[in-house]
Image (cartoon, helix red, strand yellow):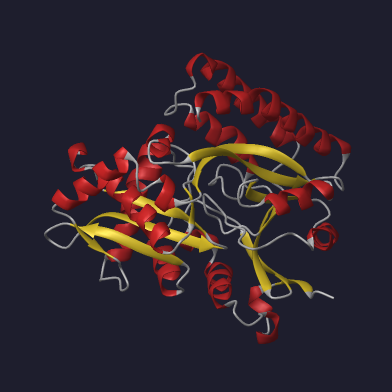
Amino acid sequence: MTLLALVDPAAAASTDWPAGAEQERAYIDAFASRGSTALISNLRTRVMALRSGARVFPVTVNDAEYGDAYVCLPHTAYALYAKDELRIVDAGPWTPALAALASGAGAALRRAQINRVVHVNNWMLSTNLHGCWRGEEVGAIRTLLTERFPAHALCVRSLNRWSDPDLCARFEADGWRLLPARQIYVTDDLAAEWAPRRDTRRDLALLERSPYRRDDLHELRPGDAQRIADLYALLYLDRYSQLNPAFTADFIDLTHRAGLFTYRGFRDGNGALATVVGCFIRGGVLTTPIVGYDTARPPEEGLYRLCSLALAQMAMERGLKLNGSAGAASFKRNRGARAVIEYSAYYVRHLPLARRSAIAALEQLLNRIALPIMTERGL
């Protein structure tokens, strides 16, 4: 029988952590001991560990927080962030309808206490990777967590039928609802689908003439962690949305020291980082939670293109598939990526009827209205 246990990191014995889970332990321990806001400044959550045999999943527990980063809060993801995103994406004539939908959904989700939620395998990143998890123990996990948190919805983010087909099927068979979250862009074979592209060749030519020099960041120099956090913030917080996770320098240092992220950047002639990516790898898939560049530099320097080039090269060098996350649709398509829908799985059967009904209504709205628009407009 698979060992299944919910572990409080503050009280965990060494035997609670299986061999080979050193990265997970370092990550979860840091959040538990230091508090989530020390590592992600706009996120309040309780972090625990779920052990399932040789696997360890980060688990986040929320009760009534509102307005924080979307990575733990469904209300932020489906209401606040959706409205924020309409400022920067082209939804065409659908924009007013989507804004009204987000507002209405937000009010209904508040009434349904949607932020009373437990997330499983939640790394608190824009894209969680589920690696080789096939979900054999989904039913046992659901039983354990609904007994421990009977008033909380259960959620697993960042599912898709490209990298997680078996896992999606397990959740559906166990009675979870798969709610569309966003459209992401993926590449199966970088050598065949990315390398021959015209825009890829242009990016490589840009690199050849660029004054910036690549640094694989095996070691961080003094000040690098803060600079990486600042570059990320310039793009994802200042340009996109303050509802993205606000990673601190301590988060950068943690993920670098634990070997959880692989970093690569480009430095200017003075040695300052001008652009950086931090890549997360699980189960043969690479994604990039950290992307940042100095947005004050002239656009013709192509710093975002250097970011894209760095992460694609890292994936190809390692023979990995690439989950390019959401956004910049035409840019990614021109470099060989294709679109797939990402879902969040919710289990709510143990909750009162009013709360279950709100999730069911949201599912219908997303599938009938938001998903067709998302697909048509490439959002």
Please say if 289 is above or below 5: above
The total of numbered circles placed on residues is: 0
Is residue 199 shown left or right of residue 39? left
* Quarter of the image where one finds residue 130: bottom right
| Quarter of the image where the N terminus is located | bottom right
Residue at figure coordinates x 46%, y 74% from the top left: 258
Q: Position of residue 170 (x, y in %)?
A: 78, 52
What residue is drawn where x is 28% and y is 59%?
A: 265
Q: Nearer the viewer, residue 330 or 31?
A: 330
Which percent across, then down, holds residue 31? 55, 67
- The vertical placement of 169 against 364, above or below, is below
Please provide percent x and percent y for residue 257. Answer: 42, 74
Residue placed most toward the observer, 175 or 68:
175
**Which image quadrant for residue 340?**
top right
- Pick out the residue farthest to the top: 93
Residue at the extreme bottom? 14
Q: Relative to the observer, which residue lies in front, 318 or 109? A: 318
Q: Is residue 126 visible?
A: yes
Q: Residue at x 77, y 72 (%)?
A: 5
- Does residue 70 appear to the left or right of 193 in the view shown? right
